[in-house]
Image (cartoon, grey):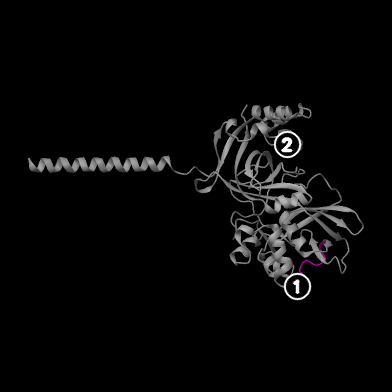
Amino acid sequence: MAVSIVFRHRVQQALRLTALVALTALAGCSFAPKEAGIGEAVSWQSLDGWQKDQQAEVWPGLLLQCNKLRKKSADWQRICTAADQLDNPNNQQARVFFEKHFQVYRINGTEGRKDGLITGYYTPLLYGSLQKSERYSYPLYQKPADMLGIQVKSCADRSARCRGRVIGDQVMPYYSRAEIDGPGQPLAGQELLWVDDPNAAFFLHIQGSGVIQLDTGELVSVGYKDQNGHAYKPIGRVLVDNGEVAREDISLDSINQWLETNPQRADWLKNQNPSYVFFYLSDKTESGPRGSLNVPLTNERSVAVDRKIIPLGTPLWLSTTLFDNSDYQRLVLAQDTGGAIKGPVRADVFFGRGERAKRLAGHMKQSGELFALLPKPR
């Protein structure tokens, strides 16, 4: 009898332990973070600010990208045909159009987060010349003739493009920023033009495009053509890590001020970012620079994203704040990419040209949420 009681007691203990393990496993499943990327469908009512936005401002950009997207899929063909039939819609008509043709999906961040980093960029104005002179002595380069685009599945750094050059019978990594701007000047003879400010030229590499006022008075545009294959490293992070600028004070203005205050160390800091951008020259000054989708960007309605996660052309609902903590909620279009724009909940807002755009972009480093508007199936 005693043995039977002991055995029954041990069985009951084992059952309780099994149940506890099962409950723990179920609890772990219920709280497991959602997979990063475009996730579950949500309702339009879940978009804070949707009814207050001026969605008609997106319409010109939508029509421009339709020239590219209608050939990509039957869904976009159908959507673009319907958009063609709406002539200059008001905000309510544009809102109804998106609700009719699209379904909203939350974009989940890494480690179960719903939010991510929202930054900004703008079109800078520089002063330059097509001829080198004492004033205009800092070059902007075209895509080098000897740079190879290497199509392989694995590279030393997957965050950058594979670019190389041939030395003897070997393909070596392409020149870094320090090498290109160093005393060896390996790209001499491949300049597009020269500008008068080395720091402005550096920031132009970060923005990816800009407008140059030539010494003749003419305005020309320079756009992103290619990149040297080295991973982008933000120099603001270098300043913070080295204790030069407090983390809460880092911005475009504070970085530029540091460069101007420390000219003897400016090259050292800029060379911490080995990424280097090559440009093309255009005499057309469109309403906005062309993004990776090859359509002109729209002020505060175009964003750069990680195209590995968010397809180019995707309408997005952006919910964030500006540097003064005022709400910034709006419909935008994923029309561009960038070397530093990596991850699911990550967007870079194009603010346009001028001092306001420069101020907003320079201070934009906010937490925000993204929602993808994907075409409803027929």
Q: Secondary structure at mark 1?
A: loop
- Which is nearer the eye, 300 or 306? 300
Residue that badge 1 annotates: 184
> How far from the left and from the top, in percent, is residue 325?
63, 46
Label 1 packing within 10 angstroms: few (<14), some (14-19), many (20+): few
Dot in front, 2 or 1? 2
Q: Mark 2 or mark 1: which comes first in sequence?
A: 2
> How far from the left and from the top, in percent, is residue 348?
67, 48
Q: Amino acid at mark 2?
A: Val
> How far from the left and from the top, in percent, is residue 376?
62, 30
Mark identifier at residue 143: none
In the rendered image, which quarter contains the C terminus?
A: top right
Q: Alpha carbon of mark 2 to alpha carbon of mark 1: how far?
A: 47 Å
In the rendered image, which quarter contains the N terminus?
A: top left
Q: Amino acid at mark 1?
A: Gly
**Rendered residue at 77%/61% (across/down):** 201
Q: Is residue 187 magenta?
A: yes
Left or right placement of residue 318 versus residue 300 in this view: left
Furthest-left residue in this view: 1
**Rendered residue at 75%/49% (across/down):** 357
- Which is nearer the eye, 293 or 203? 203
Residue that badge 2 annotates: 58
Secondary structure that dominates the magenta span = loop
- Which is nearer the eye, 85 or 90? 90
Left or right placement of residue 15 versus residue 185 in this view: left
Q: Secondary structure at mark 2?
A: helix
Relative to 43, residue 368 above or below: below
- Which is nearer the eye, 150 or 207? 207
**Rendered residue at 68%/70% (across/down):** 268
Magenta range is 185-191
Q: Is residue 315 magenta?
A: no
Relative to 274, residue 53 above or below: above
